[in-house]
Image (tube, helix red, strand yellow):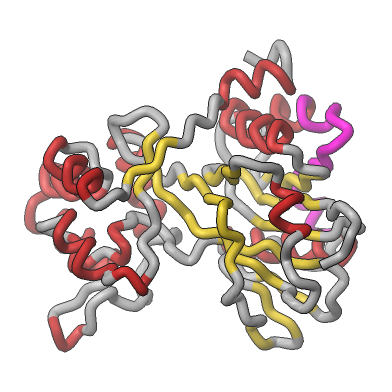
């Protein structure tokens, strides 16, 4: 561990409303990020013009000219565009650490992120931050990540009695989290949840304890339903992923599970699934609390938006 204070940055390929993008940026500026590299995956003049005026933000429109300058066609999959932009940024940055996160993910720490990074031993190139997932119907409440060492499967099935066996950690989205990468390493390429060097995955056993990744994957039913079809076809619920339970024991992946629920029970079935897995019903919330699995993380997004981008709302 060096004596100097490390610098750190965020890279993200974003799409969504200008308000959501500016909230994401303002929150992390307030957290103390040294630089943000934001790639707009679709035109958003309001977000671009506001972000472009901030000295700590580099913003790019990922239009046809952008990809032509990179001497490649625009990748069809958004995941590939994300990792291409993260890899490009990593290879040219002068920061000490870089983390790739999404516009619905917010880092949380009781003390400055740089203090955590300064404590990482010099020989460790990658550290992981684990997600906590937003609960519906409860302001600033999140479901905790359950380490595998804590009898995860038994806890999840006790809390989510109908669908817990099919959903890893009880999370609607990823449990892998995201990684902070120490910069300056040769032949690095990003994946969504990991880092590769010379085509091989770098070990990521080290975790940045004390830092949460607040994932607002489905803060309410309307948000979840609006994104459902995209996630089923091309996103976090797409076909081909491994089931949580072995298939010989009746396991299904999220694509199969949600497609089955929709076919059998329609929107009402999907709503019942969401209510249970998002922790919005009183009985599920009580069981989460009983197991110590609720975290309070007030992000104060609008307050930070007014502070860093006054006049934007």
In this view, the residue farthest toward the left is 264
Work out whether 50 lies above or below 120: above
Q: Is residue 5 visible?
A: yes
Direction from residue 152 to residue 203 in the image, left or right: right
**Image quadrant containing the C terminus:** top right
Residue 62 is a magenta residue = yes
Residue 248, picture quadrant: bottom left
Depth check: give the residue in front, 91 or 49: 91
Depth check: give the residue in front, 65 or 291: 291
Depth check: give the residue in front, 214 or 69: 214
Label count reads 0
Q: Residue at x 12, y 41 (%)?
A: 283
Residue 289 is a magenta residue = no
Which stretch did the figure color magenta? 50-68
Depth check: give the residue in front, 293 or 281: 293
Work out whether 262 lies above or below 35: below
Q: Position of residue 8 (x, y in %)?
A: 79, 52
Q: Residue at x 64, y 23 (%)?
A: 304
Q: Residue at x 19, y 77 (%)?
A: 251
Q: Position of residue 135 (x, y in %)?
A: 33, 40
Work out whether 197 lies above or below 119: below
Direction from residue 144 to residue 187 in the image, left or right: right
**Image quadrant containing the N terminus:** bottom right
Q: Is residue 73 visible?
A: no
Q: Position of residue 123 (x, y in %)?
A: 77, 78
Q: Position of residue 51 (x, y in %)?
A: 77, 31
In this view, the residue farthest toward the top is 311
């Amino acid at each position: 561990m060096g004596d100097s204070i490390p610098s750190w940055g965020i890279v993200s390929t974003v799409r969504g409303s200008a308000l959501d993008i500016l909230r994401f940026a303002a929150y992390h500026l307030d957290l103390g990020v040294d630089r943000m590299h934001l790639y707009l995956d679709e035109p958003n003049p309001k977000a671009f013009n506001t972000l472009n005026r901030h000295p700590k933000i580099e913003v790019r429109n990922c239009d046809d000219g952008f990809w032509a300058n990179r001497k490649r066609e625009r990748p069809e999959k958004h995941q590939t565009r994300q990792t291409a932009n993260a890899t490009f940024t990593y290879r040219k940055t002068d920061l000490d650490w870089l983390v790739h996160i999404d516009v619905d993910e917010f880092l949380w720490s009781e003390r400055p992120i740089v203090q955590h990074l300064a404590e990482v031993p010099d020989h460790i190139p990658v550290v992981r931050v684990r997600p906590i997932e937003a609960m519906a119907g409860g302001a600033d409440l999140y479901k905790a990540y359950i380490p595998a060492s804590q009898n995860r499967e038994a806890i999840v099935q006790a809390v989510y009695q109908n669908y817990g066996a099919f959903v890893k950690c009880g999370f609607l989205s990823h449990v892998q989290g995201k990684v902070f990468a120490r910069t300056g390493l040769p032949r690095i390429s990003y994946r969504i949840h990991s880092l590769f060097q010379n085509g091989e995955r770098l070990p990521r056993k080290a975790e940045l304890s004390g830092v949460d990744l607040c994932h607002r994957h489905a803060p309410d039913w309307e948000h979840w339903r609006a994104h459902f079809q995209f996630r089923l076809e091309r996103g976090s619920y797409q076909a081909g992923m491994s089931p949580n339970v072995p298939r010989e024991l009746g396991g299904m992946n999220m694509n199969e599970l949600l497609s089955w629920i929709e076919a059998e029970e329609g929107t009402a079935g999907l709503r019942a699934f969401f209510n249970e897995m998002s922790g919005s019903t009183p009985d599920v919330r009580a069981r989460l609390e009983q197991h110590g699995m609720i975290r309070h993380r007030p992000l104060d997004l609008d307050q930070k938006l007014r502070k860093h981008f006054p006049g934007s709302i």
